[in-house]
């Protein structure tokens, strides 16, 4: 694992693959699955998890790792029992309990998620991630909310991520209970502080949009070879335009399963484009991918 910690993921994968071949412990397979996801080998990660189920890790970290990889692959139902075991083995580990709460939330088991988060908050009153997740579990009411507690937590939060997350949580609950003016003031303040720390370049986004517009006629006419029969449903939209809501509506149909916001497609586009830029999506990649085989990208 030393190679992985130093960024040499491919070397680490080779070492663990040899370890698994020699002794297929569940702990080894869990870590191998985690490393596969880091290089976007999601199919291999899923296969490693399936193999690990025969002899799952005996330790809490190994089970939490399996749960995290399942969650990253979008299979929250499979992740849940591993998080349950991890928390059972190490009930004082708030990181494991947070992962359990997040998965319960994703599965719509709100009351159980709320109980798990309150356990964390009781031990770590300033845990920003826990407060943020808790605020989003349900619409708060005048009779049931955490606004008073959130005000205190936010006021003492350190600048950076903690202040951002607690600010978002507080603004959300304020809006829920009808205090829209204060909610807006809180959002403006935390977003202004966050914006100052962002290395955002609007020119890069402008170049991407220009490339999409320029390449669209070629993309529309690009060859499609052996397109998949089981076509996925792609929900496309700008940020904050309701794509998650559409995803949830579609997933409520018994024949549709949501896999979340996976990065497999943009990575497939990047691989087909064969550009050497460090970002997954940029103007160069869009223009290069415009004439590639779309069927090959989809497969």
Image: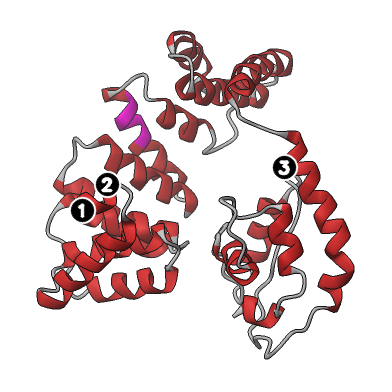
* Residue on which the image places disc 2: 5
Q: Going by the image, does 115 lie left or right of 173?
A: left
Q: Going by the image, does 8 lie left or right of 133?
A: left
Q: Which of 223 and 54 lies nearest the eye of the viewer? A: 223
Disc 2 and disc 3: Cα gap in Å?
34 Å
Question: Residue at 46% across / 44% down in the picture?
Answer: 110
* Residue on which the image places disc 1: 1
Is 15 above or below relative to 156? below
The reply to whether the magenta stretch includes residue 120 is yes
Q: Quadrant of the C terminus?
A: bottom right
Q: Going by the image, does 184 lie left or right of 264?
A: right
Label located before the other in sequence (2 or 3)? 2
Disc 2 and disc 1: Cα gap in Å?
6 Å
Question: Residue at 30% across / 69% down in the picture?
Answer: 49
How many residues crowd around disc 1 within 10 Å: few (fewer than 14), some, or many (20 or more)? some
Disc 3 and disc 1: Cα gap in Å?
38 Å
């Amino acid at each position: 694992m030393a190679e992985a910690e130093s960024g040499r993921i491919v070397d680490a994968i080779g070492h663990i693959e040899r370890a698994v071949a020699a002794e297929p412990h569940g702990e080894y397979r869990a870590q191998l699955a985690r490393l596969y996801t880091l290089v976007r080998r999601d199919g291999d990660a899923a296969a490693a998890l399936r193999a690990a189920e025969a002899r799952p890790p005996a330790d809490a970290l190994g089970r939490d790792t399996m749960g995290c990889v399942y969650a990253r692959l979008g299979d929250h139902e499979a992740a849940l029992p591993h998080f349950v075991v991890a928390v059972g083995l190490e009930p004082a580990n708030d990181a494991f309990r947070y992962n359990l709460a997040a998965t319960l939330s994703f599965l719509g088991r709100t009351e159980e998620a709320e109980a798990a988060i309150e356990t964390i908050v009781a031990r770590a009153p300033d845990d920003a991630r826990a407060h943020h997740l808790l605020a989003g579990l349900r619409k708060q009411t005048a009779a049931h909310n955490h606004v008073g507690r959130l005000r205190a937590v936010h006021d003492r939060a350190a600048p950076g991520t903690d202040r951002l997350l607690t600010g978002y949580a507080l603004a959300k609950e304020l809006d829920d209970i009808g205090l829209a003016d204060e909610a807006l003031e809180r959002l403006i303040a935390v977003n202004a502080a966050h914006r100052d720390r962002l290395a955002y370049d609007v020119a890069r986004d402008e170049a991407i949009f220009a490339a999409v517009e320029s390449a669209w006629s070629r993309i529309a006419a690009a060859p499609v070879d052996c397109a998949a029969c089981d076509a996925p449903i792609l929900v496309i939209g700008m940020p904050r335009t309701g794509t998650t809501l559409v995803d949830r509506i579609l997933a409520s149909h018994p024949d549709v399963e949501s896999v979340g916001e996976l990065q497999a497609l943009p990575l497939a586009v990047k691989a087909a484009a064969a550009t050497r830029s460090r970002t997954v999506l940029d103007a160069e990649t869009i223009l290069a991918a415009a004439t590639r085989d779309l069927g090959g990208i989809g497969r």
